[in-house]
Image: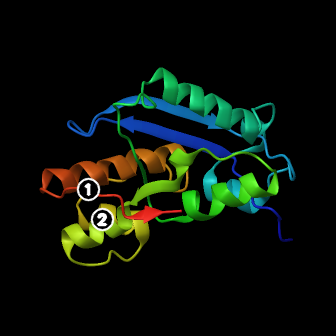
Amino acid sequence: RKIHPIEIIEFPVLKINARTFQCESTFHTYVTPMRNPQLTKFCTNLTGITQDMVTDQPKLDEVLKNFHLWLTNEKLLDSNVKFIFVTCGDWDLYTMLPSQCSYFHLPRAEYFNRWINIKKSFNKAVGKYSHGGMMGMLNDLNIRHVGRHHSGIDDCKNIAEILKVLAERGYVFHENRKQ
């Protein structure tokens, strides 16, 4: 059975220091789906997220408000501070978040409109496209995978390691995607 709309059930973000590439703070929450509150077996098998992990969690509108507060508390929205998201592909910020915000008539902050797609950065830094997405990049860079693939928070940690290794090799990151 096809689920429509596909909904965000995990919202993980790591604050990575652009000089040290160390994680300074974490925003992580599971999200109760608003339209289809019952997770499918496929979803649980893919992500490792079970029904009890999303039940009684905040809905996306509240998560977005909490995330904005976290950004504020972390001083990332101060006028003299620059930050950008790093994603593995464009799905999260080009497709998923905009479609959910549109479907549920939720405002989407301007800061979600620019990001670095680590796949494109990897391609420029290494000179080749890595087949296999994040797992392929980890393998190509000899980085040990941490956690469960498709767990949002674990994927964030692995993307951060890719970011760090590319930076250590001298790659300078630039925004390479925008809405």
Q: Does 66 appear above or below 174?
A: above
Q: Which residue is mark 1?
A: 173
Q: Nearer the viewer, residue 76 or 95?
A: 76
Asked whether the residues under the numbered discs 1 and 2 touch, taking CB atoms below 8 Å apart as contact, a structural biologist would say yes
Image-quadrant location for residue 116? bottom left
Where residue 102 appears, x then y in whole percent? 76, 57
Give residue 121's mark.
Answer: 2
Determine crowd level at label 1: few under 14, some 14-19, many 20+ residues with C-alpha closer than 10 A: some
Amino acid marked by disc 2:
Ser
Estimate the spatial distance between the alpha carbons at disc 1 and disc 2, rounded to whole Å: 7 Å
Residue appearing at x 41%, y 73% in the figure: 132
Query: Circle 1 sits in a helix, a strand or a loop, which is it?
Result: loop
Where residue 96 appears, x then y in whole percent? 65, 60
Q: Does 12 appear above or below 42?
A: above
Look at the image and tell me whether residue 7 can be seen.
Answer: no
Query: Circle 2 sits in a helix, a strand or a loop, which is it?
Result: helix
Amino acid marked by disc 1:
Phe
What count of labels does the image hold?
A: 2
- Does 83 sit left or right of 31 as displayed? left
Q: Nearer the viewer, residue 171 or 134?
A: 171
- Does 78 sit left or right of 21 as displayed? right
Residue appearing at x 30%, y 48% in the figure: 161
- Does 37 sit left or right of 136 as displayed? right
Image-quadrant location for residue 11? top right
Quarter of the image that includes the N terminus? bottom right
